[in-house]
Image: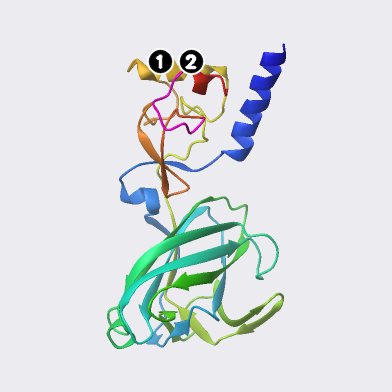
């Protein structure tokens, strides 16, 4: 009875805490290949990442954001942390953060040949039409990174701000080159071993069946037991290694269901 209660509690914790977007490893779709929002300004200018942020609205779930960027006076490698809020302001708890690396050209080169910075945030659900806010938290690199922007009003669902102090937002009058991406790849809960859309005792059995190379039912194609998958678009984990022990799936993983 006690063991059953512990297993049930662990299963609930697995569902609530580890419900990630699980995507097949290796494909472009694992990082978003379908455009939800695409802002392409007509006149090229610049926007400094330290002081600028973007608010936007979308009506579909998404997994990543892309921006065109360049450095100030030097080219080089930057490590940048980006933050996403589920609101039209930069207040409250973060919806997601991600740290990425990108090689940026210098300002002069980047005006015509910018780099595309791709930021994976994992699966971000959207109900109806929702507002989000995006900004850089910090970075390390040769100098300040800039994101490519321009004048115009080509993006009605997006505003770039040059002040980000709580509810006090100032429209910069410019628009960034900015894309929001989603994917059609299977999105499965961590622990949904047979890809049926829920986690149950059958998934514990699926670990043993899958380890024996027997076919699994559910959503097709389903991730194979022992395959590498990306969690939230970035971290690689073994499908079935529910305790994240780093080895092949075994009976200890099935006990978590």
Residue 66: % across, % down: 41, 66
Label annotation for residue 8: none
Identify the residue at the far top of this view.
1
Q: Main secondary structure of the magenta part?
A: loop
Q: Is residue 25 left or right of residue 8?
A: left
Q: Are marks 2 and 1 in contact (CB under 8 Å)?
A: yes
Relative vertical location of residue 55 with respect to residue 256 in this rendering, above or below? below
Residue 187: % across, % down: 47, 40
Which quadrant is home to the C terminus? top right
- Identity of the residue drawn at 36% across and 49% down: 29
Is residue 153 in view?
Answer: no
Give yes or no for residue 247 being in the magenta stretch: yes
Residue 100: % across, % down: 42, 62
- Identity of the residue drawn at 72% across and 76% down: 167
- The quadrant where residue 3 appears: top right
Mark pair 2, 1: CA separation: 6 Å
Q: In this view of the protein, which residue sits in the foreground, 153 or 18?
A: 18
Q: In this view of the protein, which residue sits in the foreground, 64 or 80?
A: 80
- The quadrant where residue 77 appears: bottom left
Relative vertical location of residue 30 with respect to residue 191 in this rendering, above or below? below
- Identity of the residue drawn at 66% across and 64% down: 87
Q: Secondary structure at mark 2?
A: helix
Q: Which residues are magenta?
A: 243-251
Q: Is residue 96 left or right of residue 213?
A: right
- Identity of the residue drawn at 44% across and 28% down: 240
Residue, disc 2: 205
Residue 34: % across, % down: 39, 56
Relative vertical location of residue 90 with respect to residue 161 in this rendering, above or below? above
Residue, disc 1: 209
């Amino acid at each position: 009875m006690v063991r059953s209660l512990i297993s049930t509690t662990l299963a609930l914790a697995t569902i609530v805490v580890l419900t990630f977007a699980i995507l097949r490893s290796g494909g472009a779709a694992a990082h978003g290949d379908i455009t939800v929002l695409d802002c392409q300004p007509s006149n090229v200018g610049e926007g400094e990442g330290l002081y600028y942020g973007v608010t936007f609205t979308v009506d579909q779930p998404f997994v990543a954001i892309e921006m065109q960027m360049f450095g100030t006076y030097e080219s080089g490698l930057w490590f940048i942390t980006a933050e996403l809020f589920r609101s039209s302001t930069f207040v409250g708890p973060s919806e997601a953060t991600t740290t990425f690396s990108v090689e940026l050209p210098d300002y002069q080169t980047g005006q015509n040949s910018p780099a595309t910075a791709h930021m994976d945030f994992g699966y971000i659900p959207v109900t109806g039409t929702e507002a989000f806010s995006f900004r850089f938290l910090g970075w390390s690199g040769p100098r300040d990174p800039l994101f490519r922007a321009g004048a115009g009003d080509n993006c009605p669902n997006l505003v770039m701000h040059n002040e980000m102090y709580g509810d006090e937002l100032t429209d910069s009058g410019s628009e960034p080159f900015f894309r929001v991406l989603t994917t059609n790849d299977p999105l499965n809960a961590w622990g949904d071993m047979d890809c049926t859309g829920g986690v149950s005792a059958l998934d514990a059995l699926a670990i043993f069946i899958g380890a024996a190379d027997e076919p699994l039912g559910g959503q097709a194609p389903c991730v194979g037991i022992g395959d590498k998958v990306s969690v939230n678009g970035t971290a690689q984990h073994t499908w079935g290694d529910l305790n994240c022990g780093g080895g092949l799936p075994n009976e200890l993983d099935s006990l978590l269901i």
